[in-house]
Image: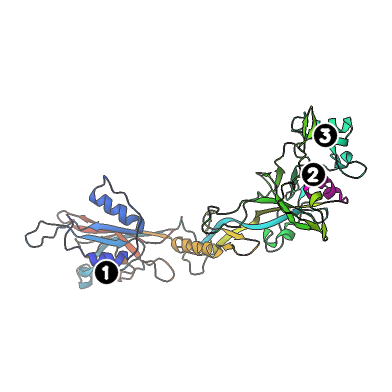
Amino acid sequence: MISELTDWQAIAALTGPGSIGEVDVEGMGLLQAINAVLSPAGFGFVIEPWAVQRGGGPPAHRLLVFSKSTVTTRKRPFLAPCGVSMDSEEGRRSELQQMSFVRDSRSVSNDVTVHGDNKRLEVTLAFTADSQTRQLHPAWDTYEHDLGYYAGLSDTICPLQWSADQMETFARNYHKSGDGFWQFKDVFRSFTFNEDGAFTSILGLYPPDIGDVSAGLADENGAFLARPRRLGPTLQYGSSGSQLHSAPARVEMCIAGCDDAKVLLPVQFWPDRCGFTLRLDEFFSLSPAGIGDIYRPFAQLTGSEYKINDIDRTDEIKQASWLNLLLNTIDDYDGLKVRIELICTLPADSRVTGKAGRRLESDWPFRSEKVISMPQRFQSQRSLAGDNDIDQTSEALAMAESIRSDAEQPMVKGVFSLRYLSRAYVPGDGINFTAGRVVDLVNGPDGGDTSMITSVLWSFGPGKNKTQLQIQNPKGG
């Protein structure tokens, strides 16, 4: 039974006003339930083994609670000086009969690095008629699969005017029902950033300098790794009342010179690198009755007037087919051209990093490194608009410093044997020095890591009564 003499006010002052989550103690005994509540919060407890009886009530035991990380009460057991007889006054005063004290440095970590997630930057990549400045490129060999072969004398593609050979070749290779479709399914449909150089042999272009796309994608020296970069969602967030948290990556297409004529393209993003494929099985339908349903991406525009250089081109824009727009843009022909933009995020080569290096005050004279990866905890993102930026580098540094503080000192363990039974020492008390003959038990450069009593054992017997104090420092590797 817990005694009413338990100092509940002292326990409340020690634990503080903080709150803990819900703890399920169903089926536990009293001591197990107390431990389930206190231990996750960083506190330990003991029940005094001797019972206290107050008034006519039954005997009960006091509950003592202590912090596992902070010493609040310090004791200095007396150790007789060297050369002193046990019959002398100082010898009789000595409390310590035997002591064992070691420093275990095997788990010391005094150089801690915390890695978060790769930094992510929001970018806009564009496919335009200028092959030298475009960032998105056709993901097929434009010489082998030349749209110009299907263009008439007016540099326009009209399937109704194709020869039998042209129709047979196109239907076989680029129509979903054709035998060669799955071999050439990316032709006229897919676009790539070519960030890793996988399409260099097709494009005849080296991987782009990603520092030109966004300076943050390269490191502080402008260097970068030509590697696949999986695109992610944008950093454009919905309103507080919206169910949309982060807008997904998207592909927009507009008529060059007329930004108002803009549509959202249905695409399938590539899972392993920065690129996408138009989700379109057919550029036009084929049936015994002939050709129909030519894909015209701007046909659904709702505006009544779209101008280029103050000239109304509304009907022409709405009637333009995908193949004609693609031909004009790739080969820079006269006529309507498009600008295709991919808005997404890309991972940088650098990660969120917090590094707490070895301090000169560290007791351990060698550098002992510890690297921790916490990609879900620490992140960094930079949006195009600059209004949804996040940089948790300082939090990662604080975490690294906290881990170093807890692990940079050797683990201290010891057993002190007192000559008699003593109730003066309880778990949670600290021992930084012995009195008389001074033995330094402090662990740490600033004396802050006082060794703590973790348990007290009493041995009973004729001429063998003694108290054992098991100690350990609250902090250590």
Locate residue 425, reporting x and y percent.
Answer: 24, 64
Instruction: Look at label 2 and name its amino acid.
Output: Ser
Please rate how many residues cluster around mark 2, counting C-alpha atoms within 10 Å: few if below 14, some from 14 to 19, many from 20.
many
Q: Which residue corresponds to the image point at 64% horizontal and 63% vertical from the top-left?
A: 385
Locate residue 221, reporting x and y percent.
Answer: 70, 63
- Quadrant housing residue 218: bottom right
Q: Which residue corresponds to the image point at 73% horizontal and 58% vertical from the top-left?
A: 213
Q: Is residue 455 visible?
A: no
Q: Which residue is mark 1?
A: 80
Q: Are marks 2 and 1 in contact (CB under 8 Å)?
A: no
Locate residue 295, reporting x and y percent.
Answer: 76, 41
Look at the image and name its color scheme.
Answer: rainbow
Q: CA distance from mark 2 to mark 1?
A: 100 Å
What is the magenta range? 317-336
Per the rendering, the mark at residue 170 is 3
- Quadrant housing residue 223: bottom right
Please name whichever residue, 172 or 151, is drawn nearer the observer in this view of the structure.
151
User: Does the magenta portion include 330?
Assistant: yes
Q: Which residue is mark 2?
A: 321
Please name whichever residue, 351 or 292, is drawn nearer the observer in this view of the structure.
292
Q: Label 1: state its secondary structure.
A: loop
Please rate how many residues cluster around mark 1, counting C-alpha atoms within 10 Å: few if below 14, some from 14 to 19, many from 20.
many
Disc 3 vs disc 2: which is toward the camera?
2
Q: Is residue 26 above or below residue 390?
A: above
Q: CA distance from mark 3 to mark 2?
A: 16 Å
